[in-house]
Image (cartoon, helix red, strand yellow):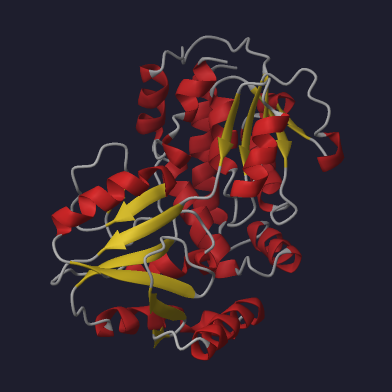
């Protein structure tokens, strides 16, 4: 088995997703995933899988990225190093890109699944092994209580909150690692922007992903009418019990504290400088000129996953995307700006 074989297998998995997304056995899998985690509505699962499908099908980008980092695509894989992947579970299959990178490097993927996402990833990897049976020997799952056994683990990729990342940093201090912390995404809107698609950047996955826009930079006296109309596309999520509890709680807090807000169902918009916002709330702040924002983005770039806007600012190390593209990363959109393939090459 060569890396080229694995690249092709992932490409064929993308085709499998596209062709089977609305049929069995994908339908049964998604029913089970939603039953296990009510946040995983089926249309959001399908969106996540469809976006993943586009990533998997870009064979040229994947191959060129691996070649750029010195991987030999046509040489038989002899790599037997084990990479532990501690998966997040905030959005459907969010850890799949890390697993894909590990397998493409020729390393073995030792996977600790999130309790919030324990069905989708095993299902996809099972479909992958049907395409390329040899890869099955390079995939292993471990239970949470076996994390204390670090024997024969050569590297760790772990994703969590700011607090859990501190634990990971300490626990895996003597092992090569990528530890991912909480990040946020923002949008910069100018006066005459067509912001179609921004509602996806805000509302998909109930705003719980690091690529979900949690803060809007808007010009002085900005009229939120057009955004409010676009957000109505997602008005049905207000009926989701868990989401509605967050919405009602945040609304009550703002009313009791005399905090002004815009009710743009299914989102509450409030003026606040913080980039982070809780579920059901998006913060916004005003600016005078777009150039003024370059300094803010530069200062905050270590906490930013991506910035949605028409165009980009002159700030290095920040991922700028168009409206509607935050939740559609390509293969080389590495989380936290850490090039996973480059790191794996050094293992």
Quadrant where the image shows the N terminus: top right
**Count of number-bearing discs:** 0
Question: The C terminus appears in which quarter of the rendering?
Answer: top right
Residue 257 location (% of width, % of height)? 50, 86
Residue at image point 65% right, 77% down: 242
Residue pictured at 49% horizontal, 61% vertical: 47
> At which x and y percent is residue 200?
40, 67
- On screen, residue 157 versus residue 97, left or right, reads right
In the rendered image, is residue 242 in sight?
Answer: yes
Q: Residue 88 appears at what percent x and percent y?
A: 63, 48
Residue 324 horizontal side relative to residue 295, left or right: right
The part of the image, by quadrant, that contains residue 337 is: top left
Residue extending furthest toward the right: 145
Judge whether residue 201 can be spotted in this image.
no
222 over 313 or under it: above or below:
below
| 121 lies above or below 28 | above
Q: What is the x, y in percent for residue 301?
A: 36, 45
Q: Name the side, left or right, on which 314 lies relative to 322.
A: left
Q: Quadrant of residue 70?
A: top left
Q: Residue at x 21, y 78 (%)?
A: 222
At a point 54% along the width and 90% down the height, the residue shown is: 256
Quadrant of the rendered image containing residue 31: bottom right
Q: Nearer the viewer, residue 160 or 97?
A: 160
Q: Is residue 112 shown above or below 290? A: above
């Amino acid at each position: 088995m060569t890396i080229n074989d694995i690249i092709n297998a992932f490409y064929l998995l993308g085709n499998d997703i596209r062709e089977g997304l609305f049929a069995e056995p994908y339908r049964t899998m998604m029913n089970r995933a939603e039953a296990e985690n009510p946040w995983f509505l089926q249309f959001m699962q399908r969106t996540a899988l469809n976006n993943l499908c586009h990533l998997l099908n870009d064979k040229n980008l994947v191959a060129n990225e691996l070649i750029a980092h010195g991987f030999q695509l046509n040489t038989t894989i002899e790599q037997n190093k084990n990479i532990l992947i501690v998966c997040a579970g905030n959005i459907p299959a969010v850890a799949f890109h890390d697993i894909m990178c590990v397998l493409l490097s020729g390393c073995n993927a030792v996977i600790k699944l999130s309790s919030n996402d324990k069905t989708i990833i095993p299902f996809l990897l099972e479909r992958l092994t049907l395409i390329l049976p040899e890869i099955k020997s390079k995939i292993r799952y471990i239970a949470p209580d076996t994390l204390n056994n670090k024997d024969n683990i050569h590297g760790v990729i772990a994703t969590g909150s700011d607090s859990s990342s501190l634990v990971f940093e300490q626990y895996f201090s003597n092992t090569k690692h990528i530890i991912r912390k909480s990040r946020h995404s923002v949008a910069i809107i100018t006066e005459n922007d067509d912001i179609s698609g921004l509602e996806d950047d805000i509302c998909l996955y109930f705003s719980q992903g690091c690529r979900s826009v949690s803060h809007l930079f808007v010009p002085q006296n900005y009229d939120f009418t057009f955004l409010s109309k676009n957000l109505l596309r997602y008005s049905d999520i207000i009926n989701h019990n868990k989401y509605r509890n967050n919405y009602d709680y945040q609304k009550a807090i703002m009313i009791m504290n005399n905090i002004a807000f815009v009710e743009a169902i299914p989102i509450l918009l409030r003026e606040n400088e913080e980039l982070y916002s809780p579920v059901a709330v998006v913060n916004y702040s005003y600016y005078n000129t777009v150039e003024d924002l370059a300094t803010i983005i530069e200062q905050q770039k270590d906490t930013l996953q991506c910035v949605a806007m028409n165009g980009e600012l002159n700030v290095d190390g920040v991922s700028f995307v168009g409206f509607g593209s935050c939740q559609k990363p390509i293969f080389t959109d590495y989380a936290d700006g850490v090039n996973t393939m480059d790191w794996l090459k050094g293992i």
